[in-house]
Amino acid sequence: MMEQTIENFEGTKNIILDGGGSSDVEAGIEFIYHMREHLLDISIATVYALVVYAIVLYINKKIKG
């Protein structure tokens, strides 16, 4: 438990930290697992970004040339 005293505040704020700190490897595996659930969303966003980039390149080519 952490305790913090703040100026102009009557009282204290208590923060309880979980003791089950996970390692970086576990956090990475969990991130990849959750990313896998959103594979369709990520794919659509990637295709959209590539299309927008292609449009920007096309417009720049037309303006300059």
Image: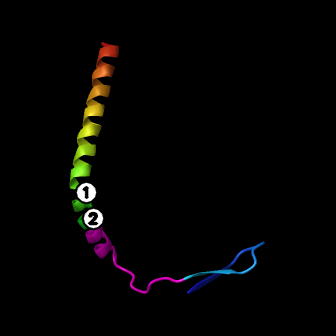
Q: Is residue 32 above or below residue 47?
A: below
Q: Is residue 60 above or below residue 53?
A: above
Hey, what amino acid is under mark 1?
His
Q: Which residue is mark 2?
A: 34
Residue in view at x 26 percent, y 60 percent: 35
Q: Position of residue 17 (x, y in %)?
A: 49, 82
Left or right: residue 21 compared with residue 25: right
Q: Position of residue 41 (x, y in %)?
A: 26, 50
Q: Which residue is mark 1?
A: 38
Looking at the image, what colour scheme do you see?
rainbow
Q: Are marks 2 and 1 in contact (CB under 8 Å)?
A: yes
Q: Position of residue 47 (x, y in %)?
A: 23, 40
Residue in view at x 25 percent, y 57 percent: 38
Highlighted magenta segment, given as a residue range: 16-31
- Residue 23 inside the magenta-drawn segment: yes
Residue in view at x 24 percent, y 67 percent: 33
